[in-house]
Image (tube, rainbow, N blue to C red):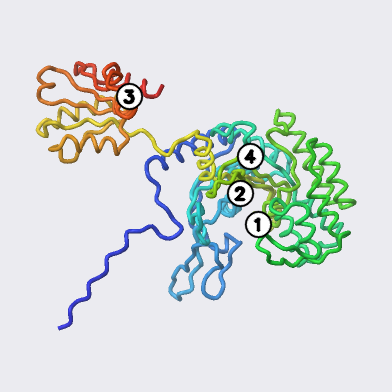
Amino acid sequence: MAKTKKQPRPKAETPKGFRDYFGSDVSERAEMLGTIAAVYHRYGFDALESSAVETVEALGKFLPDVDRPNEGVFAWQEADEDGRGDWLALRYDLTAPLARVYAQYRNDLPTPYRRDAMVPVWRNEKPGPGRYRQFYQCDADTVGTASMAADAEICAMLSDTLEEVGIPRGDYLVRVNNRKVLNGVLETMGLVEDVARRDAVLRTVDKFDKVGEGGVKELLTKGRLDASGAYIDGVGLSEDQAAPVLAFLTSKDDDAAITLNNLRAAVGGSQSGLEGVAELEQIADLLSAQGYGPDRVEIDPSVVRGLGYYTGPVFEAELTFDILDEKGRKRQFGSVAGGGRYDDLVKRFTGQAVPATGVSIGVDRLLAALREKGRISSTSAGPVVVTVMDRDRMADYQAMVGELRQAGIRAEVYLGNPKNFGNQLKYADRRASPVAIIEGGEEKDRGVVQIKDLILGAKIAENATLEEWKSRPSQFEVPRAELVAKVQEILDGQGE
């Protein structure tokens, strides 16, 4: 008789492109989300948590082919009696679900509808360093108004949000551009109907930050050698044809009025381009009226942010301070948020034009930025640990921890094997506990407890001489009735 083949044990490993988040990571993110939510709420946005699963048809960007939807989403086909159910997918962003929600509930929602959302999204893309397939987005959108005041408000709110989470003024810039301006440039070049060349120009414009004016000129015309020595074919424009694009990309000046005049020259007589410049001027004036100057928000034609998706203003928040990369070279931290006006998304469902604008903040990148600035650490304080000297007196220890919790102090009783007291202190160290409570039989008889300041004890043991140790005790004996007050005093001292 053949032996039954053993089922192999599952591997205890995270799927590729995903990660697990532990205590401090979760609490830091929750604190940041709370701070951002408070700013959004102050601006009048209401929270929305839409379904994590949408039909692929509703997502719109990815449609089913013969076997499965295109790359980019985690999708599956819902089985029905004929085996031909709808394709469903995990949401890959929060904008497409918003369009569906607004179209579905538009008769019940106020117009304009202002919503914020702070939930995870999933993208079936190739993972890389710092790039995961599940991550949080933090969005705020206004649906149902074409007023540039909505776009200006997004920029002001983005500025406020960065400052409130801990990015000081001077370490960031919110940069604003407009898709209509680039459309005007393409019109003057005669490329509006030439889809292939137009898209090639857009891709080249997107490389301006990397290759500069000279590199863009080469890519628009005859081509160029890249850093590796490989030759990249150009779009094939003449220098005269390329000139409006270069004028557009280099039109930025320290004075916003001069930037706007340069943009007017770049778009020539294009009505779409002039309309875009006028919208940028409105946004600048509205921001100035609220006290948001170019030190916080500026007009910058080099912002391109997937211009094919947006229909009007686009914005990007960039952190301007330097960090060191993995090779020790200085580089700027870069973008942590972006968005813009997308007036055609809801129309897919309703057939009617519905203007909309919004922004998305990358929470994980913001957290990484704050760590680079030393504004947060990767560790957080653990609970006060009440050690167990006598397992038969567990009720006494639970009474202590109960009093601490009632006073708002995070605390726990050691629930492992109490036989080895050293292991209890090792446990407290691993938990990053600030204080340990000790009450043996002798302390119980005298009505006292020992309170050990673990933070101070570690510092003294690492840095101090024996005399300094004696002058700065890290363990205190206090009456049992003073337990909570003494622990609070020690915690307050650690905070200082």
Q: Which residue is mark 3?
A: 464
Disc 2 secondary structure class:
loop
Q: Residues within 10 Å of mark 2 (few under 14, many from 20)?
A: some
Give the Cα separation between the discs numbered 3 and 2.
Answer: 67 Å
User: As shown in the figure, which amino acid type bears the numbered disc 2?
Assistant: Arg
Give the Cα separation between the discs numbered 2 and 1.
Answer: 10 Å
Disc 1 secondary structure class:
helix
User: As shown in the figure, which amino acid type bears the numbered disc 3?
Assistant: Ala
User: Would you say 78 lies left or right of 232 here?
Assistant: left
Instruction: State the quadrant of the N terminus.
Output: bottom left
User: Would you say 231 lies left or right of 393 here?
Assistant: right
Sooner in the amino-acid sequence: mark 2 or mark 1 = 2
Q: Position of residue 5 (x, y in %)?
A: 22, 75
Give the Cα separation between the discs numbered 1 and 4.
Answer: 41 Å
Q: Which residue is mark 4?
A: 320
Give the Cα separation between the discs numbered 1 and 3.
Answer: 72 Å
Query: Do the residues bearing badges 1 and 3 touch, measured as CB atoms within 8 Å?
Result: no
What residue is at 56 percent from the left and 34 percent from the top?
41
Q: Position of residue 226 (x, y in %)?
A: 69, 61
Between circles 4 and 2, the one closer to the viewer is: 4
Q: Closest to the observer: 227 or 108? A: 227
Give the Cα separation between the discs numbered 4 and 2.
Answer: 40 Å
Disc 4 secondary structure class:
strand
Q: Residues within 10 Å of mark 3 (few under 14, many from 20)?
A: some
Q: Which mark is residue 350?
A: 1
Quadrant hosting residue 3: bottom left
User: As shown in the figure, which amino acid type bears the numbered disc 4?
Assistant: Thr
Quadrant hosting residue 223: bottom right
Q: Which residue is mark 2?
A: 106
